[in-house]
Amino acid sequence: MSKTRLAELEAELEQRTRELVATQAQLHSLIERNADAIVVVDEQGICQFVNPAAERLFRRRADALLGSALGLPLVVGETTDIDIVGEGSGVAEMRVVETIWQGAPALLAVIRDITDRKRAEQEREQLFLEQTARAQAEEALRERDDFLALASHELKTPVATLSATAQLLHRQIERQGSLDPDQQRRALERLHEQSRRLSILVEHLLDVSQINSGKLSVTRLRADLCALVSDVVTARQLTATHHRLVVRGPEHLEIDVDPVRVGQILTNLIDNAVKYSPDGGAIEIELHCDEASGTARISVRDHGIGIPLERRSRLFERFYRAHADGHVSGMGLGLFITHHLVELHGGDIEADSPADGGARFTVSLPLHTA
Ligand code: ADP
């Protein structure tokens, strides 16, 4: 090899060496200044390298860390959250990859102090929880106020009618000395209907408060569902003078239920059928025994205004009214209570609108098992 060529190669080697040293210095500076802690651990878990950020994070000097076990679970390829213990404790995020250190396999852990980020996240979460709790409390207050307004409005009408009817009776008796049978019948019907309305309202309020406090319960007895239906229908037909209540089904159907509560379920459904079919007509109550599924089914069907499909899913919610146009009075509690009572019996209730109009509610209750 010529002298000139040798000199060229030497110069090139020097140049490469300078470049290499410069790159190493850059890399060193990058690692030294990196805000993330960088730790190299050998196969025995012993610390071989730490940068200044690692000293700050572990609150220990490099000479105390090097040569000792890191004491952290190092899982290659995974990002784990670790607790920083000691003074000013916090949280860090650690990512581990495989590397070669001084010719031997080792692990490189990059650890980022995320204490501030976590704290900010927790503060945001806390703020969100507080805002949600405040919104819920405000909503509950609004709901309570709306409910009080609605309940007082609903109670006012029958009370006013009762008092007006009593005054009218009083005046008529004073004027005429007595009442003719027709006047007597009309007045009694009005008194009966309004006092019935009043007692149902009060009953609903009591039931809702029991449901809210988890105290509503049922006492099951062996009962004949057909007899129960017949009693409710006979009583209700007396005041539902514009409607014809028709019952179809078997003569007897034994079930284990709370007879008072099942009476209430039927009354609620029949009352609604009457209320939401203002033009009168037939209200069909059908009983069916389904031995295969072990259930007794009762459906109450009217030919009234029906329920639009998109509103059916919310029918059993507290206070929900599917026809909130104010024409028909109500508090939106009857179906909520009914649903709850059916569930307490281990049964099921659903609503549909038959193709030829009106609404149908179907209740399934478990049959009596010997
Ligand atoms: P309320 O009748 O006091 O409003 P309910 O809880 O008994 O409360 O019923 C909830 C809503 O379901 C009613 O407001 C009404 O819109 C609808 N609904 C219940 N029964 C019927 C029915 N037979 N036909 C049409 N709509 C009904």
Image (cartoon, rainbow, N blue to C red):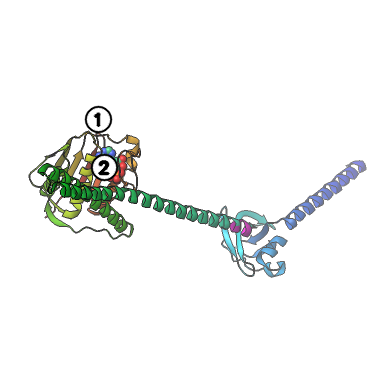
Where's ligand 1: which quadrant?
top left
Q: Secondary structure at mark 1?
A: loop
Residue at 26% x, 38% y is: 276
Which residue bears the numbered disc 2?
350
Relative to 82, residue 353 above or below: above
Q: Is residue 83 left or right of residue 187?
A: right
Nearer the observer, 135 or 145: 145
Q: Quadrant of the N terminus?
A: top right
**Displayed quadrant of residue 216:** bottom left
The residues tagged by marks 2 and 1 sit, at their Cα atoms, a distance apart of 16 Å
Relative to 242, residue 114 above or below: below
Nearer the observer, 152 or 99: 152
Range of the magenta residues? Answer: 113-119
Name the amino acid, label 1.
Ala
The image position of residue 174, as x and y in percent, is 17, 50
Which residue bears the numbered disc 1?
355
The image position of residue 118, as x and y in percent, is 59, 57
Nearer the observer, 298 or 63: 298
Q: Residues within 10 Å of mark 2 (few under 14, many from 20)?
A: some
Nearer the observer, 124 or 270: 270
